[in-house]
Each structure stands twice: as C-alpha cells, then as structure tokens.
Amino acid sequence: MELLPVVAKKRKLTKRTLKEWLFVYGMLLIPLIQFAIFYIWINANSIIMAFREFTFEWDENDNEIYVWSFYNFTRFFKEWSNPESVIVSALMNTLKYFAAGVIMVPVTFFVSYFLYKKIWGYKMFRVVFFLPSIVSAVLFVTTYIELIKFGGALSTVWSWFGAELPELINDPERTTGTIIAFTVWTGFGVNMILYQSAMSRVPQEIIEASKLDGCPWYKELWSIIIPMVWSTVSTTLILQFTTLFNSTGPILLFADAGRQALLDNKEVTTIAFWIYQKTRGGVDLNYPAAIGLFFTAVSVPLVFLVRWVFNKIDPDVTY
C-alpha cells in the first residue's frame, strides 16, 4: 500500500518529462530544418553542380539541359595558363588578404600583452581597438573613405609636407592595398579579447616570481606568457588558416554607386567575391561551384596539417 503513491508520482513525473522533451525537440525542429535546407542541401547541391556542364539550352518545360562531365574543372585549370585570367588575379588578392590576417595574429597578441600589463591609457586603447567589432562596418567604411579621399583629413596632412595624396580607392592598382589597410585597422577585435582573457588566467604567483628574479618584459612574454596561452594562440592561427581561400575585404562596401566599376575589375576582386558576383546574377552557376569545391578540397587537408603541426609544438604547460 505504501508503494502506490510512489508509483503514481513516478507516472506523473514521466508524463511531465515527456512534455518537456516534446517542447525541447519542438523548439529545435525549426533550426534543424533550416540547417538541413540551407546548409546540408545547398552544399550537397553545389557539389553536384560542380560536375554539370551547362549547355545553355532548355527543354520545353524551361528546365536547364546539362551533361555530366569534368568540363568545369578542365576550364578552371586552363585559366592558370593565362596570366591575364581573373581567377589568377583573384587568387593573388585572396592570398594578400590571408597574409594580412596571419600577420595580424602576432600583432594583436603583442598589443594584447601590453594592455594586459596595464600600460598608461590601456582602458582607452582597449575601447579603441575593440570598437570596430561592435560598430557597423558601413559606418567605419564611410569614415575611412572620408579620411583618405581627396580633400579629406589624410590629404590635408600630406599637403602640409608639400605632397599630394594619390588616388587610393578609384585606382584599381591601389584599391586592394587600401582595403587591406582598412582590415588591419579594424582587425584587432575578438582576438584581442581572447588573448587578454587567456593572459588574465596566468597565475600571478608566476609573474611575481619572475619579477623577483629580475625577468625583463620581453623574456616574460617569450618564456612565460606565450607558452601558457599557446593553446589560444594556436587556435586562432588554425581558424585563420580555415579562411585561406575565403579571405576577402569589404569590397562591396567600398564600391558604392560612384565606384561601381571597381566590382568588375580583376585587380580588386578575390575568390570569394568573384564567386559571389557569379552567383548573384549569373546564368552558369556550375563553374563557380566547381571552383569552390576545388579550393575546399585543397584547404581541408591543409588545415588538418597546420593543426597537426601546432599540436606538435604545443608546450607542455599545465596550470
């Protein structure tokens, strides 16, 4: 007789648990459907498209007529024999953006170290460096353009020294460098917060002991801080390598109505931006799909190789 209330209580708890599970899975159903459609299906479809050869013909139902082949990859490899190819220029520009991103990792780490050491005005510098991450990119691009345009603040400063500021945006040969400079200016952001957070977890007893031993700041940085936060640094470097062929700047924001010609200039475009342009209003989407698949196939093993290398040099530090 004493077991009946316990059994009844368990039944009631089971029904409640069932309702909770139904609620949780019901809430997860919509994002799961979105993930299946907009990620799994779209990526699977892009892989299939890479092996389709567009014939520029349609049947009576207006369906695209295509044949299965490696034509898109053959066409892509033939592009490399042409030094004037848009793809070659786009790849070179992409590697420039990637190199700037890799260089920014040690620069950001170095700046984060001095902010961690609480130099004079470190709170102000922290806000200045992180501000581009929380303010609209459109606003920063507009401000940047106003600074570097003819008659802007930078042009005025150059005129004080009897020099004339060259055209930086409308000249395609200088546009990529100008946008890279913008990405460097706004590239501290999240990594700086990650590095400072990792440095703040370093035991202060170790820092104080190094001070008593007369350890200079550069030795503290190299022998103490870097080994103890290397896992964070290596993670950001690996993530940087995942964007090897996706590295690009805010080209579309720089090319407003007055500079629309920049969008079609091969000296400015990148791989990611070129694919965006082709898929935005193009007819043959199979060719950019093949290019995207090729660079994905190249970058995936490269990322795993970089990860393996960084894990090998990971210092054996626990705290």
Image (spheres, rainbow, N blue to C red):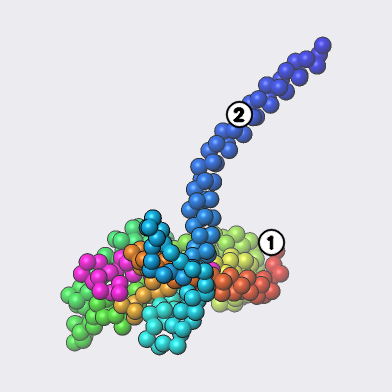
Q: Residue at x 25, y 66 (%)?
A: 256
N-terminal of the two: label 1 or label 2? 2
Check the image and name the residue furthest to the front: 60
Name the foreground residue: 54 vs 293: 54
Q: Left or right: 256 with respect to 197?
A: left
Does residue 270 appear in this view? Answer: yes
Q: Are marks 1 and 2 in contact (CB under 8 Å)?
A: no
Q: Which mark is residue 225?
A: none
Residue toward you, 222 or 26: 26
* Rendered residue at 56%/74% (across/down): 298
Q: Is residue 108 left or right of residue 279?
A: right
**Where 131 falls versus 106 (above or below)?**
above
Query: Residue 292: x percent and y percent?
Result: 48, 69
Residue position marked by numbered label 2 in the rendering: 19
* Amino acid type, callout 1: Tyr
User: Label 1, on which residue?
Assistant: 319
Callout 2 amino acid: Lys
Residue 306's spot in the image, x, y percent? 61, 74
Quadrant of the drawing holding the C terminus: bottom right
Q: What is the quadrant of residue 136 in the picture?
A: bottom left
Residue in view at x 57 percent, y 63 percent: 199
